[in-house]
Amino acid sequence: MWSIEIQDAVRASLLECVKRRRLVFVQANPAVDAMLRRALDEGALVSGDLASDAGGGPPLFLDSFDADVFQATDPARALGVARERVLSILDEGRDVCLVSKAPRIAFPQCPGSSLLDDAYVFHADSAVRAVTADQSHEREVTVAWSDSVDHAQLEVALEMLGLDALACLDYLLFDLQQTRQIALELASEGEWEALRGCGLVSFDVESGFASFALSPAILMPRVAEVISRSLGVQPAYPPVTTSLVDIERRIRRCLRVRAIAAFGEKWRAQALVGDQDKRILDRVTADAGMRPASVKSLRDPLEWLSLGELLEIVQTAPWTQRLGHERELWNRFASEVMPIRNRVSHMRLLRRGDLERVRYWCLALSKTLKTQLQAK
């Protein structure tokens, strides 16, 4: 935890930042909390809430800002109300510092979120580096979390990060096993901001890498525990799901049209490859409780196939002509879209870029497959 010397230096830097910028956002962590408590006890800061008087006075530190938003029945509406109130305080000539345990990316995207976009982000770790650049300090007095961290406190901090930042931690720690030097391109600017603000990562400006401030032996079990009990849905889930549905049904429709053109009334049985007919009958039986005599009696057997099985037909059945595309395109499609489809299917956390990828393929296939259908 920060030494008194570092606390004083960070406090001075924060106050100067608020004076210069007027509206500042600072993400709280144990070291920031300790610094703010001490400053409040000494009368160096003035804390308040959205109901505080606006008329003049020293900078107002809104230390319950995140609670006012996330504990509301409608967080998006609460953020809009907070925006109007903060703008009113600023108009009255009083500077404002928004103090939040949640990073900016955890707040809902709505008209009120422009308040967070307009606020200058104060990075406490940068202030610490500025203080310690020319002096030798023990690591224990420069970090936000000590190795003897309280696990319950750490889990609360991880929960406040929100699902997108948790997904980033999951990706770095468990998928990539990045426990030492982490290339900055592996996370988005918003994700790094969240992890820096929480005090979980430190930056090496010269090398261009980041590293975790806590050992993986401490951090990984807590991340796993918090993710396992997270019941929310990331904001990108609805549009990602909508795009995946569009893609899958569009491919299925195009295959159906080509199969009918190739096989006529026998298309239901002739369109399938390998043992897909047996797999379909097993699924229908499990779903309806009765086993059809054959796939010929089904309205559309293709609707009982997964995206991977549809691609198997596209890639192997000559009559599909790969829906007018080269094999390389479908290989790239499978490598980019199938992992996202599997994440959604198993209700796992989405990754950065998932939404952009499925939207790209949705748009690309909507144009090319539409042309294929019109040609028929």
Image (spheres, rainbow, N blue to C red):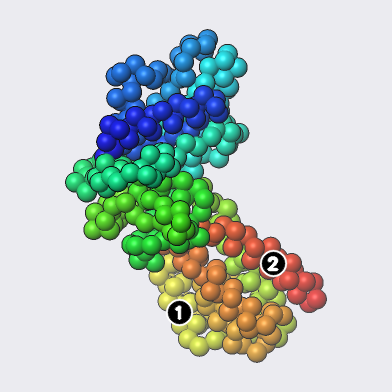
In the image, 22: left or right of 216? right
- Kindly identify the amino acid type of the residue bearing the numbered disc 1: Arg
For the residues labelled 2 and 1, the Cα–Cα distance comes to 30 Å
Horizontal and vertical percent for residue 155?
A: 28, 45
Q: Residue at x 55, y 70 (%)?
A: 336
Horizontal and vertical percent for residue 154?
A: 28, 44
Neighbour tally class for label 2: few under 14, some 14-19, many 20 plus, Cα within 10 Å: few
Identify which residue, 220 or 60, lies in the foreground. 60
Q: Is residue 142 above or below residue 285?
A: above
Which of the labelled discs sits on residue 279, or is there none? 1
Give the residue at mark 2: 364
Horizontal and vertical percent for residue 32?
A: 34, 34
Neighbour tally class for label 1: few under 14, some 14-19, many 20 plus, Cα within 10 Å: few
Task: Determine if residue 286 is in view.
Answer: yes
Identify which residue, 290 or 186, lies in the foreground. 186
In the image, 351: left or right of 296? left
Q: Residue at x 80, y 76 (%)?
A: 375
- Kindly identify the amino acid type of the residue bearing the numbered disc 2: Ala
Q: Quadrant of residue 264?
A: bottom right
Question: Which label's residue is closer to the chain start, 2 or 1?
Answer: 1
Horizontal and vertical percent for residue 176?
A: 39, 66
Classify the position of the N terminus by image quarter. top left
Secondary structure state at the residue bearing disc 1: helix
